[in-house]
Structure formats: structure tokens, C-alpha cells
Amino acid sequence: MRFHRRRARCTPASLNLENISTAEIQRIILAVCILSGLVAIYSANTLFSSVFTQDSVSPEHVNIYPDVPSASAVFEQDVGISVLDAKNNHTFGGLRFAERKEEEPLFPYFGTSILDTKNYRTLGGGRFSAWKNGDTPFTPTPGMKVMSDKIARGRRVHVKAAMQHAWGGYSTLAFGYDEVQPISGKGNYNWEGLGTTLVDSLDTLWLMGMKDEFYEARDWIDERLTKGLLHEKDTFVSMFETTIRSLGGYLAAYDWSGDEVFLNAAKDLADRLLPAFDSPSGVPWNTVHLITGEGKNEEHCRHETNLASAGTVQVEFRYLAKVTGEMKYAVKAEKAFDKLKALKSKDGLYPLGVVNTEKVIRGTGSRYTFGGKADSFYEYMLKLWIQGGKREKKYRMMYDESMDGMHKMLLQHSEPNGLTYIGQKRHHNNIDEMEHLACFVSGMLALGAYTDPNGLDSDRAQRDLRTGKALAYTCYQMYASTKTGLAPEIVGSFGDNSEEDFVPKYDAESYLLRPEVVESLYILHKLTGDPIYREWGWEIFQSIEKYCKTDIAYGKYSNVEDTGDGEETGGQVQDSMESFFLGETLKYLYLLFDPDSPVDLNKHVFNTEAHPLRSFEYL
């Protein structure tokens, strides 16, 4: 008797095992096994889908964005890999099964490119803790790159729109001024009337494809240069700021466009800055007069300069010497940097103050920091070595010794969650605070690791890369842990054993539109391919859009812990937008989301104002 004719008897009331043959029992068991297998497959597939959909609630295991389709669905759509593949299907008992395939792991943290500032809410700190110690929990794969790049191209559009908005306000209301004030709409001459925002923005305009705006700015420069008015200012200017913003801006515009107008403007400005190196020591004065060439230090510190001011002009002057063939620019700049080497402590770190009014320079004070007035000096150690084709070993040696000193003397871990941060020392005492400015170290360490002469797999390179990634997590948390999702200028109280690892420092609660964190996120993503850095950067950009945007441009935000929604009144946009927001912050955000960028870290060296210049071997 065949099985299908006995179905009526297979009920709990009528089943009689004595009348069923052994063969029939075997057939029943086989059928039950098949049905059980189908149930298991369906359950697994349902579980697989639910883990990665918007319905899940654990931020450590699911997509954290509420408007995102399931990661599996996006992955199948964008990458072309699906759980059921018709080409490899086989039939069994009238049912179709997919042959098991080796698939790429899914990355569950992809967001969208939707920008909805009205409904955007920060999600809080402490998320993504798997990255805290510098680990890479998800090994980047080709499939992840495809999906990340697709999302990034959508986000790139919004960053360009932000640049168009900021530039539109500047060009409409303050074209040729140093800055536009984003609330009042007034133009100011905070940088002595050099058109600083215009010049600082040139390569950002170029890289974003805003060529009409680029050439409008070019014509303004050309006209004033032809009339002899561009830099003919009866005033002292900051040697450091004018070099990195204006000279660097001209040089990058020339490097990308090849337009001689920018090279001529760079030479005109550099010739006016060059007398700053004529101090008794050869280490440049803080300020220089653009007409007379007189140099002096700032009034509050007449006898000394600082590390950053003295040691962050060399990339620009060396590039100018290379493209013009006039070695005077490089000789004086390199001489100053070489003299600074004598100030190195036994731990490889350098004192903040530098007496440059005597023939032999001296270090002053006992403060050691990677924050303001010291930061970019360490950065240029590495970048001078890269710029010169990695042939000038003295610069790489200075860098490696300083990184050893940083790990030994300044690297700390917070309480209670063990976040990695770079503190400061004064009189051999630890200062438990970290400046936003110091977050550039994250990207610098990664770049140093990937170019290490001993190889990326060497102990030193792996140490530096891990530290760089751990610092990136900490710096991201400086944003994510505040109510606005914006970072304060300084965080402190790392070691007070409170429930929070750090809090904004008193009188430093403002977000100044600074670029250092997104700079490091860009470099880390470019080098490692880890898509998490784009996700963090997107959160930062959304907070900038929500809290810093005005009808005219973008402004600094006064208190990152005040959203302006409640009784507190400290959270508000200020009437100030420095040129680096267009020249650095928006540029790094755009590059972070631009898979098609011509910028290549193997060929280009960024000056400390985010102006990418080709290294010498590619000129």
C-alpha cells in the first residue's frame, strides 16, 4: 500500500503502527526530516533578515539609522550576491535549494545619504566600542567598498551643497574680504585684507568641480596682482597663518590648474614673507611687515616664537623653490627647521617655546603638547620626508623619535572606559585634557605607519596604526557624546573616575568648525578602507548642518552641550566663520565621500591647511 493512500489514517486518533510496514515508516521519517529541514532554512533566513533590519534595536549589532533598508537587501541589490542564486539552484523532491556559497561578511553599520536635519537626532556616545582600542572588527572587502562608495557619492552631493551655500554667502556679501560673518553678513579684514577666505578656498572649489567660482576668484587675484595691490598692505601679518592659508592656497591652486597667475601671486607673497627668516637665529619671526620686511615676535611674547610658527612653513617654501628653481625659498626654511632639531629632549619631544632673538636658539618652558602652537611641527617632520621622495632621512628620524616620545610620555587612557588620548605635560605633571587640534595625530600616525621604512607589518608601524585608530575613536566620541553631536575645543577630566570619560573644558565648550577630526577620518579611510570612518564623518556633517548653518553661511557654535531646545541659552551660532571651514573642513568631508577623487596620498602631501601639493618626484 502506497504512502499517499494512507494519509487519512495519519492522525493521532487513527495512527496504528502495527499496520505500517518498515519501508513505510522509513518513508515517513524521511518526509519528516525534509519538512524539518525546510522549517530550519526558513527560520534561519528569517533570523538572518531580522538581525540586519531597521526593526532591531541593539546599536552594537544593527544598522543605527532608522530609515535604512536591511543591510542584506542593500547588499544584494548593490553587490549582486543573494542568498538564493537561480543559476546554482538544484531541485530535490520538487523543492528548490540554493547551493551554499562562500559570501562576503555584511557590514551592519551602513547608513544612507539622506540629509534630514529637521528630524536628525544625535544617538549618543559609547557606540561602536569594538573600534575603541584600535581594532578593525570588520575586514574591508570589495563588496563593502562597492556599497560604501555608492552611499558616499550620495553624501558627497550634500557636502558640495554646503560649500555652495558657504561660498555663495561669501561671494555675494563679502567677496574679496577675509571673511564673511554668517549672521550679520558683514565682511571683515581679520587677516589684514588678503582675501583669505577666497584664497584658502581655491583648491576646494577646484576639487568640487566649482570651476566658474574658481575662475571668478582667479580673476580677482589677477586684477589686484596686476595693479600691485594684492599684497601691498602697510601692516604686519602672521608668518605662520599667512603661509599655510594664503601661500599654501596659491600653490595648491597652481598645482591643480597650472595657471601661472597663482604661481606669480605665490612668488609675490613669498618674497614679502621671506624676510621673516632674517632673525638673529634664522628661526622666523612670528610676524613680518608686508612692505618693509621688518620682522618681530608678537607683542605679548617679544623674545620667543613657538614650534608651530617656526616649523610649519617648510612644505610651502620648499614646493615654491622646486617649481620656480629659486632655491632661496627652500634654503632659509630648511635652515630654520634644522635648527629646531637641537631642542629635542631625551624623550624625543620638543618644548613649546623657542627663543629666536639670539644667535643660538633655546627652548623655553616645560610644557610638552601636541595641541596648539606645537601640533603641526610634528606633522611637518613626516611630510617633509614624504615631500622629498622619502630620501631625507633626518626628517623621518625626527618623526619616529617624537612618536616614541609621545607614546612614552603623553599617551594616556581615560577612566572609566579606557579611551586613548594624548595629554600634556607641564613641569613633569600630567594635564588630563585633549585639544580638538590634537586629533590630527590620528591621521598622521596612520600615514606614518603606511610609509614606515620598516614596512607596515613592522612592530613600530603596527603600534602607530593601532594608536592612530584608537585616537580616531576617541576624537569621534568627542562629537558623539555631546548633545549636539559637535565637539568642544578642549575636553578634560579624563582621570576623575566619573561616569563620563571626559567633559568639555570650562570656557572651551565651543565648536569652532575645526577640521582635525574629519581630516583623520579621511586619511584613515583612504588608507585602511574601513567604511566606519565614513559613517562617523556623516554624523559629524549632519550635526554641522543642523546646528551651525545660517541663511548666509555657517558659524561657530557656542556651547556643544546646548541644543537650543530647552531652557539653556548658551547654544547658539556665533557671527564668525574662519576660512579653514571652507579650506579644510568641507574639503576633507568632501574627499571622505569622494571615491573618484584625483587626490592620491601616494602622490600628494597636504600642508597643514589641507592644501594638497604633489611631492617632488611627481612634479
Image (tube, grey):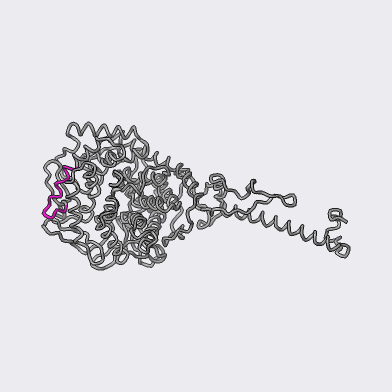
- Left or right relative to 107: residue 482: left
Residue at (57% x, 52% y) in the render: 55
Question: Going 27% across and 60% down the picture, which residue do you hit?
Answer: 397
Q: Position of residue 495 (x, y in %)?
A: 35, 66
Query: Looking at the image, can residue 566 be seen?
Result: no
**Along the line of sight, the residue nearer the viewer: 90 or 377:** 90
The C terminus appears in which quarter of the rendering? top left
Q: Is residue 277 magenta?
A: yes
**In the depicted structure, whether residue 175 falls above or below residue 506:** above
Query: Looking at the image, which is closer to me, 610 or 393?
Result: 393
Figure label count: 0
Q: Is residue 34 magenta?
A: no
Give the quadrant of the N terminus. bottom right
Looking at the rendering, which quadrant does residue 555 occupy?
Answer: top left
The location of residue 235, given as percent across then percent down, is 15, 42
Write the start and end of the magenta stretch as one range.
Answer: 270-283
Residue 223 visible, this orientation:
yes
Q: Would residue 112 appear left or right of 598 to someone viewing this image?
A: right
- Could you tell whether 102 is left or right of 228 in the image? right
Q: What x and y, as percent, mark residue 101?
A: 60, 53
Residue 259 at x, y percent in the picture: 27, 35
